[in-house]
Image (cartoon, rainbow, N blue to C red):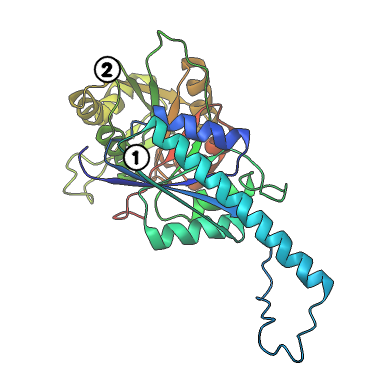
Amino acid sequence: MNEQVKILIAYDGSECAGAALEDLKSAGLPKTTEARVLSLADVFVPPPINEEIDNTFPMYVPAGLRRAHDLAERKLKEADDMAKWASEQIKKSFPEWHVHHEAFADSPAWAIIRTADQWKPDLIVMGAQGHSVLGGRLILGSVSQRVLNEAGCSVRIARIRPKRVDSPIRLLIGVDNSSYSRAAVEAVCRRQWPSGTEVRLLAVVDTVMAITPDPSQPQTLKWVEVGDENNWDEVRQVFQPSADKLRSAGLDATVMIRRGNPTAQILEEAESWGAHSIFLGPKGTRGIDRLLLGSVSSAVSARAHCSVEVVRTRSIV
């Protein structure tokens, strides 16, 4: 992958935010990456005090308003210091990256979404949970899920999984033959992974699955009964082109078929295999579609013990 990648990193100084910085080393991001670190002071900034309008009759400023200004300035300074520190750590790990930082006061979720809408990154990176500068919650549950659901780009909810020295990076991709899961495969192919990286394509089957023999003719569908495991070889063949594409990118790829609740199967496979990251599309299509509907990608991102990246490309958002 030679094109420049833009990533927006939400950082709040928490342990989980630190894990997100460490997780960048296992995300396969290229040398041509521009990173923007964003720290937020979840505090109300009162209107500015202008005491120089008329020195003859100085403006009366209530003590409470002065305290609010002082608090906002202090918290913004703390947020800026955090963002600067995080950007310096990223530069140490990725000296070839272009890294900059910023801080401002705003509601965390909407600030992240609005910044992403304006700057248009390829990826947002967040910790699984954290705290705001004021000691409240910054990236906990509802905020991370709101960003995950509302952002117009890919979102990575980062966690650090203990890795043995001799263990390769392991990536689990949820697939369902939709354009969304194919985008997840493409995203993995475009990254730069170390030699020996292993990938499992996991399809969680329902009762029937729609197969499009010719991708250029989406109206031509073949329905396969997948409740019977005797038909799973045909299902596996549907995903072989994706596995071949991953192998062409230098990755060790296999196709896995499971039956059951999609969220549970993805989480169980990731845990038992020791996956370092799960890649998912934001939604899927009928038949095997319950695999990657929004509720599943949200549930997996909230409950997984490893990093979860929900892949969006602007052409299919």
Q: Nearer the viewer, residue 135 or 262?
A: 135
Q: Is residue 108 left or right of residue 90?
A: right
Identify the residue at horizontal 19%, vertical 44% (top origin): 215
Which residue was labeled with disc 1? 181
Work out whether 226 lies above or below 299: above
- Occupied quadrant, residue 28: top left
Which residue was labeled with disc 2? 195
Q: Nearer the viewer, residue 79 or 143?
A: 79
Mark 1: secondary structure? helix
Disc 1 packing (10 Å; few <14; some 14–19; many ≥20): many
- Occupied quadrant, residue 211: top left
Q: Amino acid at mark 1?
A: Ser
- Please say if the residues under marks 1 and 2 sit with CB atoms less than 8 Å apart: no
Disc 2 packing (10 Å; few <14; some 14–19; many ≥20): few
Mark 2: secondary structure? loop
Q: Nearer the viewer, residue 284 or 97?
A: 97
Identify the residue at horizontal 66%, vertical 67% (top origin): 45
Identify the residue at horizontal 46%, vertical 42% (top origin): 87
> Could you say where residue 67 lies in the image, as x and y percent from the top left?
78, 65
